[in-house]
Amino acid sequence: MTVASPKETRGAAFALYRSPLVSVTMAGTFFLKMVSFLCIPFMTIYLSENVDVPPYVIGVIVGLSQIGSLGAGFFSGVLSDRVGKRLVLLVGLFGSAAIFLLFFLVATFLKGTAAFPVLFGVLNAGYGVMSAFFWPVTQVLMADSLPKEHRPAVFRHRYVLTNCAVAVGPPAGVLLGLASAGAAFVVSGLAYLVFALAFWWITRGRAFEHAGGPSERPTFTGALKVLATDRIFLGLTVSMILFALAYCQIGSNLSVLVSEEFSDGVRFFSLLLAVNAVGVIVLQPLATAIAKQLSSRRTILFGNALFAAVCLIFGFLDLGKAGLVALVVVISLAEVLVVPTVSIVVDELAPADLRGTYFGASTLRNLGMGVGPAAGGLVLGVCGNPALFFFMGLCGLAALAVVHLTLRENSVADTGASPEPV
């Protein structure tokens, strides 16, 4: 048997970019994530400075974007399988552009009024809905464009690109003076609009519709029945809700904690976000090596165990900048072990004609992201700083238990090359 050289292996891994659709979608992933992270991570701080309400109320407002994506993710997935992926993508892109520009108008003309927090919450929920129309479908398009043996690589590359964008976005926002300012909404809105127009132009005349006839297209009730009977998918979703419930504290309540503890809290928080993103990038080779040695089930279990352990340990330690950086680095490794691997498993579980439905329904994990800011804010307000890390650790342990019970006898969860491309 001929063993491929490292150079040949790298070449095979990047051969997937010969598909123009994959290249454009990956470029959009980086570009749009970068501009949205000029303002989204600082929303908690922005509201705390401009709205006189308790922390948990701010958590509710921030979490509405994730709540908005819950039902929308499932419906957008089924719609992409029924009416075409291009239409769903364009609705999400143009809608996101409108939402960001409306954010700017509300922040400029209604700040200080009673309507400000209400409208801010409504727009944040709308952003979640539009995101659910766009992001899951991009994964479906790439999966449809590639043979199965290339999909694990593209999901991991996509995750690395996302974190590259996260590494650039927040520091750029601080450097340009956009963080916590309405100008960030304008920059993000215009960027979404430009990319929406570019995507519309590039995809003209291309068919993204469901391959079958109208009678073969999935119905909402039929798709829901399939998902409801897929025990493995349900278990993965519950575990990711719990993981997201804990993980979202890094981008929400940790910002309040850091801004209160340190005089340069906003700048240090942006540094922590950058460390998280850079950590995912730098630790990607290590995570890939671990994943190749383990099954998907064991990779997810190991990532959850690592996350839970570091959070529980940190609950006993005093706050310090070096310690927070170390915490974020370890969480980055856990993150890159868990999140891309779950996407790989979802792709393997999904029937070819329901791939949009499965990836859309997987956004139900955003329930954790939606509830997390309010839950963490409540924990902070009632129990103090250390309790937040204990809360995160216990959520990680619960996610680990669900994965162990759900996937312990599942052979489909192990990744591997497909004998034939899709």
Image: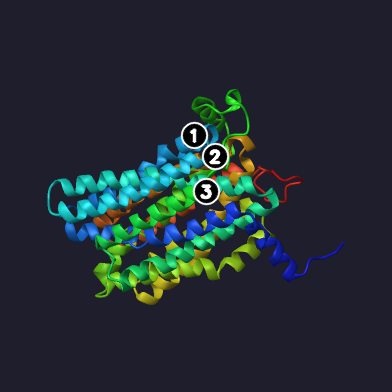
Query: Which kind of residue does numbered mark 2 sit on?
Result: Gly
The Cα–Cα distance between marks 3 and 1, rounded to whole angstroms, is 14 Å
Query: Which kind of residue does numbered mark 1 sit on?
Result: Leu
- Badge 2 vs badge 3, beta-carbon distance below 8 Å: no
Q: Is residue 252 above or below residue 279?
A: above
Q: Quadrant of residue 381?
A: bottom left
- Badge 2 vs badge 1, beta-carbon distance below 8 Å: yes
Q: Residues within 10 Å of mark 2 (few under 14, many from 20)?
A: many
Where residue 213 appears, as percent x and y from the top left, is 61, 26
Residue 138's disc is 3
Residue 51 visible, this orientation: no
> In the drawing, does residue 338 fall left or right of residue 17?
left
Viewer-proximal residue among 48 and 351? 351
Residue under pointer 1: 79
Where residue 368 appears, as percent x and y from the top left, is 40, 47
> In the drawing, does residue 399 fall left or right of residue 103?
right
Residue under pointer 2: 356
SS class, disc 3: helix
Q: Is residue 104 above or below residue 281?
A: above
Q: Quadrant of residue 45?
A: bottom left
The Cα–Cα distance between marks 2 and 1, rounded to whole angstroms, is 8 Å
The Cα–Cα distance between marks 2 and 3, rounded to whole angstroms, is 10 Å
Query: Which kind of residue does numbered mark 3 sit on?
Result: Thr
Q: Residues within 10 Å of mark 1 (few under 14, many from 20)?
A: many
Please give the name of the residue rendered at 24% of the width and 55% of the height, measured from the top-left corner: 104
Please give the name of the residue rendered at 48% of the width and 70% of the height, measured from the top-left corner: 278
